[in-house]
Amino acid sequence: MAAAQDNTAQSTPESGVDLPAPNLSPAASGMNDDAGAPVDTHSTRLMLTTAAHFVQQHLHSELAELGLTPLDLSVLSGLAEHPGAAVSDVAAQCLLSESTVERSLAELAQLGYVVAENGRHTISADGSRALTDARALEDELFAEKSTTLRMELSSLINRLRDGGVLDPK
């Protein structure tokens, strides 16, 4: 389930496949401690990728203590919003492939976090506790900026979803 992560690979939620992690040191990324360098000289893609990598790396190590991966957290969160959901419903909710969700659900069932019956899945009491603990870890990661950051990310995602336009005009 949750494997120890090193800095040479990262798992993509869409495929569940480990890919080489980019070298995200400040020097390699072009991001440095030079306070005089304007942020707009860095590509948006690089800044988003770098931020996502560091968040994923930290969250992955914290979730591993609960026996979970970030993918498992997504699947449990999807089930929490749609109890009794079929694999296809969870996949759509989490923006993941059905095969990826099926693997995660099988692993979560082995841990006793999910119960499957007649093709429908629900979170067990142990799964609810694990989800609560995982969300607390996630909240700790963004402790002081959680609400503002989530609102900004939500706005960005909605603008991208509505045609990929990042210009607020």
Image: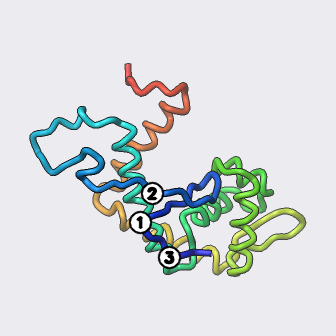
Q: Are marks 2 and 1 in contact (CB under 8 Å)?
A: yes
Label 3, secondary structure: give it.
loop
88 or 154: nearer the viewer = 88
Q: What is the count of numbered marks?
A: 3
Q: Which residue is mark 2?
A: 21
Spatial separation of the CA atoms under disc 2 and disc 1: 7 Å
Q: Which residue is mark 3?
A: 4
Give the position of the C terminus as an image quadrant.
Answer: top left
Spatial separation of the CA atoms under disc 3 and disc 2: 14 Å
Q: Which residue is mark 1?
A: 7
Q: Residue at x 61, y 66 (%)?
A: 72
Percent position (x, y) of residue 56? 44, 60
The residue type indicated by label 1 comes to: Asn
Give the position of the N terminus as an image quadrant.
Answer: bottom right
Q: Residues within 10 Å of mark 1 (few under 14, many from 20)?
A: few
Using residue 24 as the reference point, say whether residue 17 is left or right of it: right
106 or 23: nearer the viewer = 23
